[in-house]
Amino acid sequence: MVGALRVAIAEDSAILRDGLVQLLVDRGFVITGAVGEPDALRSSVAQHPPDVAVIDIRMPPTFTDEGLRLALELRARYEGLGILLFSQYIETRYAADLLADDAAGIGYLLKDRVADVSDFVEALERVAIGGTALDPEVVTQLIGATRRTGSLSVLTPREREVLALMAEGRSNAAIASAMVVSEGAVEKHVANIFTKLDLPVSENDHRRVLAVLRFLES
Amino acid sequence: MVEPAEDTGVHVRIRGKELSLAISEEHALRLKALAQQIIREPFTKRPWAELAFFLVSGGLAVVGLGFVGVTMVAGVVLAITFFGLALLALSIRSARGIGGWQRGLARAMLDETVEDPEPFVGRHGFLGWLQASLRDRVGWRAVAYLAIKVPWTILGVFVAVSLWWDAFACLTGPVFSRGGGGLAVWGLVRGVFPDSPFWLQEGGFFHGIGLFILGALFLFAAPWVTRGFVTVDRLLIRSLLGPDPTAARVRTLEEARTHTVDASAATLRRIERDLHDGTQAQLVALAMRLGMAKEKLEDADTVDLDRVRELVDEAHRGAKEAIAELRDIARGIHPPALDIGLEGALTTLAARSAVPTEVSFDLRSRPTPAIEAIAYFCVAELLANVAQHAQASRASVSCAQQGTWLRLVVRDDGLGGAALSRVGSSSSGLSGLTDRVHAVDGRLHLVSPHGGPTVVTVDLPLTA
């Protein structure tokens, strides 16, 4: 990590915004802007480009999906800008919109996740450096909604667990520590999954995520 | 009490005996007014307008019924064929049209404004039109109107119109030395005096005088008889040519239901928004602070206790705020105060209001929970409006029973000028109330002149 990561925040709830600023500053991030509505974030990002923008989905004026549209817009305009969508509920369609062509530098997390500060910070860092961070809830919904249940049934329970963690965007090392197994064991599981599901093998974590998501969506 | 006033009374002397009729001043005045009206009536516009309406609309009705009747009979006879059904439909549709003309005539000549019935809605294609026409309640009611109106008109012509005619004939009789040949004379007078009375026997001075007096009597009686016939016609028009009461009620209920459904969807949305922006955000922030505190405590060597205490402090405050917000939201869904009854709930509301508010409560029976809730939300919303917009110094709430109705009156001494319009956010609360009230067939009435005071009256059925 070169220097402190720079974060812009768009969140209309003042309590949460202040809390986030406090938490991130505490963890050594640099806050380039903390605002309450989409336009303010546009100008903040233009003036002080961040590495990653944390964006609430429901913001003024209509409190529906302003944040999502803003995220898509910023992504198209600033290459390499990480986007972490932050919401109180998970909408699978939003995830699909967001991951339409690329999973690099994309995060979609429930706001509850900030309670586990380390996990949250880790996810934010992942997104900032071009990785992916999908909420377990998103992955659960995707797996629940997939029509590929037949293909998934060829996986062992352990492999399905690995698949879910992989879809969240975690690296092999992170999966290993989450499952309390060795990294080698995880690599073996991953290889099995790719063979069983006939997925193109990829070294890159976020390409791997995309492959898994495409599989679940198709 | 009005004392009988001896000196202003009317004294009548009959066959030498003095019969003292003590008529009170008030009655005397009333009698005088009545006499004046009877004398003036034939020379005012109204009886002539009514007579003209009776003749014109009667003529139209006869022709109309003729057409409708012929087509209908033909339609029924040919009903087994397609053509018969089409004729029948045509008959009903034309009855609807004639009904419309009758309504127009009544509006133009009698100032009798009857609302138009619901418009004809033909379904797709000719078959749809046919079916809708045959089932057109408005058309059938117009047929019924014509069927009653025509005999009524014939009777009216025999009674009322002949009175006018004989009045005219008798009054001009002495001049043209004829008269009294009309129906009124033959029917009424000859009925009462089977032997032709002396003053109707041809020729002579008494014949002339008698005819003249009879004509005058007929002239003064005719407007009232005409009015009687026209009044019945008005009632027929109102009940048979106006909007179908059943259909109108169905429509009102449908509208009210739509509004209620919309209102409850809006309420749910508001509650969701309150939870999302308020409580949920509070709890996330709370969890975040506790998470930070927890992480700080994990590293036992370098614990920044002050910072941890600060975080816990903030979390503690946030938890209390979340509880207070949750309580407010819950109260908006169902006010717990209602569990102890409407009176207690209204008293609590008044006590919480920013404007000093007096409550009077007089219900003999307890309304159903739905009505209690509507009454409660009405008062809550109205008092909130008073506090926000009225700049009032005092307000009062009265809740009283009137038969099977509950009447709420909320009054304030503020600026007035409140309106029930459906646009703008400040009044949306009031129209939301109207919807809630209409949904249970209640009424909301607002009087709010500029400069005040504002009085809102809400009538709700006790059970719904």
Image (tube, coloured by chain):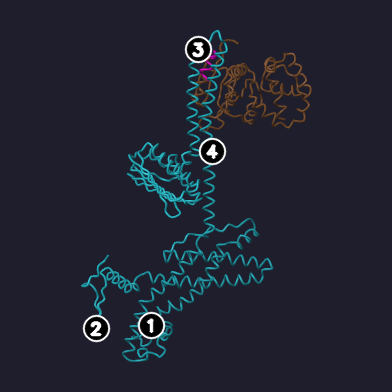
Chain colours: A brown, B cyan
Badge nearest the viewer, 1 or 3: 3
Real-space CA distance between mark 2 and mark 4, rounded to the nearest whole angstrom: 86 Å
Real-space CA distance between mark 4 and mark 3, rounded to the nearest whole angstrom: 43 Å
Tag 3 or tag 2, which sits nearer the N-term?
A: 2
Tag 4 or tag 2, which sits nearer the N-term?
A: 2
Instruction: Report the front residue among A108 and B362.
Output: B362
**Quadrant into which the N terminus of chain A falls:** top right
Where is residue B360? Give x, y as percent: 37, 46
Say what amino acid the circle numbered 1 marks. Answer: Ala
Real-space CA distance between mark 4 and mark 1, rounded to the nearest whole angstrom: 77 Å
Residue B268 got which mark? 4
What is the secondary structure assignment of the residue under circle 4?
A: helix
Tag 3 or tag 4, which sits nearer the N-term?
A: 4
Residue behind mark 3: B305
User: Residue drawn 33% across and 45% down?
Assistant: B452
Residue behind mark 2: B17
Tag 3 or tag 1, which sits nearer the N-term?
A: 1
Read off the magenta span: A20-29
Where is residue A143? Give x, y as percent: 70, 28
